[in-house]
Image (cartoon, helix red, strand yellow):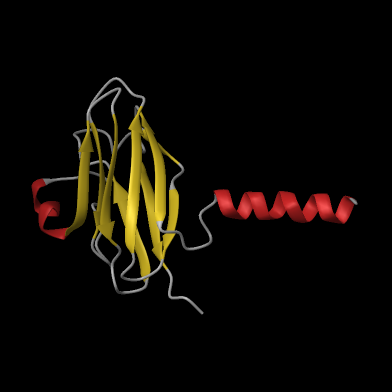
Amino acid sequence: MRKLFCALVFLLVMTSCGTHPTNTINVTMDDFLYDPIKFTVSPGDEIAFKVTNTGTIVHDFVIMKLGKSAGPIFGGEDAANIYWQVEIAPGASMETSFIAPTEPGEYEVVCSKPGHLQAGMKGQLFVVADE
C-alpha cells in the first residue's frame, strides 16, 4: 500500500512539474511570478494556452526563440528574438492557442514588462520529441 501511495505521489509531482508533453498550458500570473514555471510540449503541436492574471498589473508571457535569452533585462533588442507572446490585463483570464516550436530544446519564458524579469518573472518551455 505504501509503494502505491509513493508511486501516486511521484506521478502527481512529475505531472505538476511539466515533465510530460501536454497540449494545454494552464498558467497563473501574479505580480512577478508564473505558476507553474516549467512547461513541456511536443514539437509542432497546437497548444491551448489558458491564463489568469491574479496580479494588480499587466503581465505578458513571452517565449523566446531557441537559443535566445533576454538576459537580466528585457530590452528593445530582444523583440526580434520573440517566438510567441501574449499580454493579459490584471484580474483577467483568457484562452488562446499557439503552435509549439518544431525544434526540440529549452526555450526561455519571460515577462517583458519593465522590471518584471529582474524581479524573477521567468520560466522554461521544454520542447521534447515523442519517443
- Pick the residue in front: 49 or 87: 49
Q: Is residue 9 left or right of residue 83?
A: right
**Residue 121 visible in rendering:** no
Q: Is residue 31 above or below residue 6?
A: above
Q: Is residue 10 left or right of residue 25?
A: right
Q: Is residue 28 left or right of residue 8?
A: left
Q: How many marks?
A: 0
Q: Is residue 53 above or below residue 25?
A: above
Q: Is residue 1 above or below residue 68?
A: above
**Residue 120 visible in rendering:** yes
Q: Is residue 15 above or below residue 51?
A: below
User: Residue, x 11% and y 52% (percent of image)?
Assistant: 79
The image position of residue 62, as x and y in percent, is 24, 48
The image position of residue 28, as x and y in percent, is 40, 35
Extreme right residue here?
Answer: 1
Extreme bottom residue here?
Answer: 131
User: Residue, x 25% and y 23% (percent of image)?
Assistant: 57
- Pick the residue in front: 38 or 86: 86
User: Residue, x 53% and y 60% (percent of image)?
Assistant: 19
User: Residue, x 52% and y 62% (percent of image)?
Assistant: 20
The image position of residue 66, as x and y in percent, is 27, 67
The image position of residue 22, as x and y in percent, is 45, 59
